[in-house]
Amino acid sequence: MRTRGAWLSPERRGADRVVERPPALPDAARAPLPRVFFATQDRSGPLIWRCLWPAAALVRQGYYVAHGRLQNPRSAQNAVGTDAIVFNRMSWLGTELPQGEAFIAEQHRQGRVLLFEMDDDLISIDCREQLHLLGAQEGLSPGEVDDAILRRLESIHRLDGVTVTTEHLAGVVRGLTDTPVAVVPNAIDWAWFQDVSLGAPRQDRRLTIGWAGGRRLEADTAPLAEAWRRVARRYPHVAFKVAGYQAPDLLAAVPEAQRIAARWEPLDRYARAYAGIDIGCCPLADTPFNRCKTPVKAYEYAAMDAAVVASPTVYAAALGPDKFGLLADTADAWEDALCRLIEDQALRFTLAARWAKRVRERHSLPGQAGAWPRAWANLIGAARARLGLRRGPPLVAHGMYRG
């Protein structure tokens, strides 16, 4: 039996679309500590996982967690009265560093702590190849990407703390800076994901194997592409969906009649790109960049009731051997795992149900939202003690619009 939507409470269906209509902020003066402002600059996938979802969950629990662009006076006004500003994957460029240092000094004078949030390894030279690829999507040259790596690390050196997604990534950061680090694992807004995805009815009734993701090195998808080529030939009644980045090797592996292509939806409804996927594929090559990732794609497949096949890198610890999903690291292993799930419907449904229950109970919001204020409180307390800052900033906006 398919269960998608079964765990979505009636009061949440169609409610609180946290991307385009976040819940109203409480009074900062009466909200529990810490009070936080996320400084953002883009609307990429990490923003929803590391800002929009947790902020909405915490606001519903009474916390004051705002977000927006500091360069925008209207949104920056929401940072007034907060205990910390969290820079979401942002940094000052070399020419901006003097202005940034003045901004930091002003915030410290007001008793406010400045933190950095990072969910990928954006500062290690070991990850340069992957970062060059990601930078190319934004029109950046390799030299500009290398400069951004350096400036990001320089910014972290000057800030008061860093939040990251995993202990592995925390180890990378600690190896490059003395800035304190706290780990806050990723958690999916289960109700939001199901709510939005239910708005995209299934269009293709065939059993569908799917991959969803952004631009990446071909090393990630090469074994999967070869497995798809073999499986498509063995099972002509099976469809293959590529959502988001249209990975050339995956598209080329499958005959056009069996291929479903879906570009990313806007952020407020990106969950719809996963519609119709019965078996979700999570391939990751064993590289320094990928070892710092988290199993979020498997969480998203769980919310769609899909069984999961994944690479051991990152996913082995989450899925376990054949308990919540299947693991594969070569084309042969991918082929075997996908064929097992195609031919054994009971296994496919059992693994999907177990994994959905696991994610809903252990890796979803609002249950896991409390990890954020605990991490912030620890970093803020340590920074105030280290810097001798007075406890609690004044409710004034002076110096808030710089940097």
Image (tube, rainbow, N blue to C red):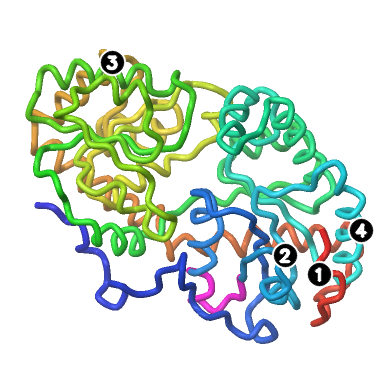
The x and y percentages for residue 63 are 58, 75
**Quadrant where the C terminus is found in the figure:** bottom right
The x and y percentages for residue 183 are 61, 48
Asked whether the residues under the numbered discs 1 and 4 touch, taking CB atoms below 8 Å apart as contact, a structural biologist would say no
Q: In which quarter of the image is residue 352?
A: top left
Regarding mark 3 in the picture, which secondary structure is present there? helix
Among numbered discs 1 and 3, the one appearing first in the sequence: 3
User: Amino acid under label 2?
Assistant: Leu
Label 4: few (<14), some (14–19) or many (≥20) C-alpha neighbours in 10 Å:
some
The CA span between labels 2 and 4 is 15 Å
The residue stretch that appears in magenta: 57-65
Q: Mark 1 points at which residue?
A: 400
What residue is at 65 percent from the left and 48 percent from the top? 89
User: Amino acid under label 4?
Assistant: Ala
Residue 70 image label: 2
The CA span between labels 2 and 1 is 7 Å
Residue 226 image label: 3
Left or right of 22 in this view: 195:
left
The CA span between labels 2 and 3 is 46 Å
Among numbered discs 3 and 4, the one appearing first in the sequence: 4
Asked whether the residues under the numbered discs 3 and 4 touch, taking CB atoms below 8 Å apart as contact, a structural biologist would say no
The CA span between labels 1 and 4 is 11 Å
Q: Mark 4 points at which residue?
A: 102
Regarding mark 1 in the picture, which secondary structure is present there? loop
